[in-house]
Amino acid sequence: MQATWELPDGRKITLDVAEGMNLMQAAVARGIPGVVGECGGSMSCATCHVVVTPDWAERAGPPGPFEEDMLDITEAGRQPASRLSCQIRMTADLDGIVVQVPAV
Ligand code: FES
């Protein structure tokens, strides 16, 4: 399965992501710029903020209640399709997902 990160400078990086792995883990493991994942996925840092592209927003689903609160403190400012990428777990349904790394 794959996911693509669109960077603020226009570059697109596509990585293989194993089922069950979250998108923050995949991004940090391969050094995607702008995805820090400081808290390791415990929803306490918001440094894994991404914006899900329109084609994928519905499948990725809405943020959970606690994630909602954390999205209000993202450095880049929240957008309608903002998510914490540590909370997006790869499934067959999300194979091919495209997310944007917001500019800060
Ligand atoms: S990695 Fe810290 S909130 Fe996602």
Image: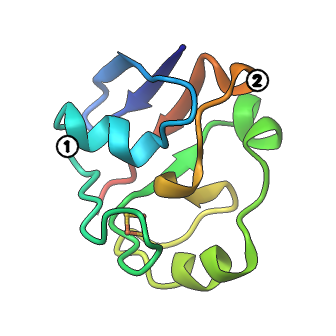
* Residue 77 locus on image (x, y percent): 46, 73
Above or below, comparing residue 104 to residue 10 in the picture: below
Residue 65 is tagged as: none
The quarter of the image that holds ligand 1 is bottom left
Q: Residues within 10 Å of mark 2 (few under 14, many from 20)?
A: few
Residues at circles 2 and 1 in contact by the CB criterion of under 8 Å? no
- Residue hosting label 1: 33
Q: Residues within 10 Å of mark 1 (few under 14, many from 20)?
A: few
Above or below, comparing residue 14 to residue 77 in the picture: above
Which residue is at the front of the view, 47 or 20?
20
Location of the C terminus (image quadrant): bottom left
Q: Is residue 40 visible?
A: yes
* Residue 43 locus on image (x, y percent): 47, 74
- Residue hosting label 2: 93
Residue type for callout 1: Pro
Above or below, comparing residue 84 to residue 33 in the picture: below
* Residue 75 locus on image (x, y percent): 34, 75
Q: Secondary structure at mark 2?
A: helix
Q: Is residue 32 visible?
A: no
Identity of the residue drawn at 72% across and 42% down? 60
Q: Quadrant of residue 7?
A: top left
Which tag, 2 or 1, sits closer to the chain's start? 1
In-image side of 72 versus 66 (left or right): left
Q: Secondary structure at mark 1?
A: loop
Depth check, mark 2 against mark 1: the one in front is 2
Q: Quadrant of residue 6?
A: top left
* Residue 42 locus on image (x, y percent): 43, 72
Q: CA distance from mark 2 to mark 1?
A: 25 Å
